[in-house]
Amino acid sequence: MDSVINAQQIVNGLQLGSIYALIALGYTMVYGIVRLINFAHGDFYMVGAFAAYGAFYLFNAYLGSGGVLAFVVLILAMAASAAIAQLANRLAYKPLRYKPRLSSLVTAIGVSMFLEYLFSALPVIGPNPRGFPEIIPKRMFTVGSAEISNYVVIDITVAAVLMVGLTLLIRRTALGKAMRAVSQDKDAARLMGIDVEKIISATFLIGGAFAGAAGLLAGMTYPRIQPYMGILPGIKAFIAAVLGGIGNIPGAVLGAYIMGLAETFATSYNSLLGEGIAFVILILVLLVRPTGLLGEKTADKI
């Protein structure tokens, strides 16, 4: 019995960790480039979920349920979240780029609350939770001692494809090289002819798109969405990024999967413990290894 439970918990933890990883990557990329803790990032995830919800009802009659519809909905969810992230960058963060960091941090909290209240006030959305549609018919399979659904495979696969794509972009493309250069030294990158603002914009676009993909996957997996749905997942994904080493992309992925597994195992004992385990992890990391598992000590410019 224990082996069955453990196998099931591992599968569920990997599924949850995949969603956290996509959100955490946005946090860590933005921090790595701009040194901004973007607390509105969880709300970009919420925007992706609602964009996916709307896209389903727009295209369902034409495409029907299935893989084609799911792909179209995924692209539109990523595009909507990327657009909101870019809008927040241009209107809220860019004017404060060279101001004290506290100003940007407070602004990020303000952007987060604005998006939550805006979506709650919109007549077509409102504050009440609503069920998320079944974009792809759900099917259950038995693999070894675990019962898994096709949604588990979809969540893990989509996250893996996006993370591999991001890794290739960072390591193999001119944009990725420019992002690494800006992350290391903005002034030197600017002297080498790199348009720093374009790189920052690209970072927000990519991070926002990943949050949108996470919003769709979360909506399919836990079919209940509402305007405040991004608060806790956003905080937990941020803690995952801190656990792995904020600003470190492999660290964010590692931290997210550790967070997903820890939350799943803790929830099996007590649901309240599952909700609180992320904050226990945060306290332990800050006490024992503030730079995170894969983070490096760097001197901050004051």
Image (spheres, rainbow, N blue to C red):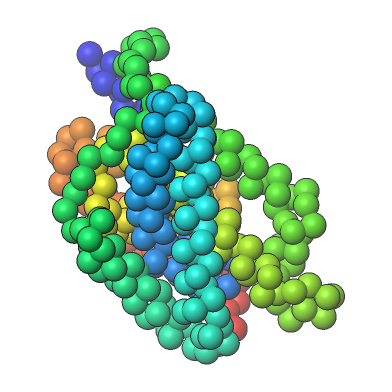
Snapshot quadrant of residue 260: top left
Q: How many marks?
A: 0
Left or right of 161? Residue 138 is left
Residue in view at x 58 percent, y 41 percent: 162
Q: Report x, y in % for residue 134.
A: 32, 30
Left or right of 117? Residue 47 is right
Residue in view at x 36 percent, y 46 percent: 54
Residue in view at x 79 percent, y 57 percent: 174
Left or right of 251? Residue 221 is left
Q: Report x, y in % for residue 24.
A: 46, 53
Q: Is residue 285 visible?
A: no
Residue in view at x 39 percent, y 66 percent: 40
Kindly give the residue lying farthest to the right in the view shown: 192
Q: Report x, y in % for residue 227.
A: 26, 57
Question: Which quarter of the rendering shows the C terminus?
Answer: bottom right
User: From what the image shows, is residue 195 above or below residue 214?
Assistant: below
In this view of the protein, which residue sits in the foreground, 112 or 68?
68
Q: Report x, y in % for residue 152.
A: 40, 27
User: From what the image shows, is residue 30 above or below residue 103?
Assistant: above
In this view of the protein, which residue sits in the foreground, 273 or 73?
73
Q: Is residue 225 visible?
A: yes
Question: Which quarter of the rendering shows the N terminus?
Answer: top left
Left or right of 4? Residue 200 is right
In this view of the protein, which residue sits in the foreground, 199 or 261?
199
Kindly give the residue lying farthest to the front in the view shown: 62
Snapshot quadrant of residue 4: top left
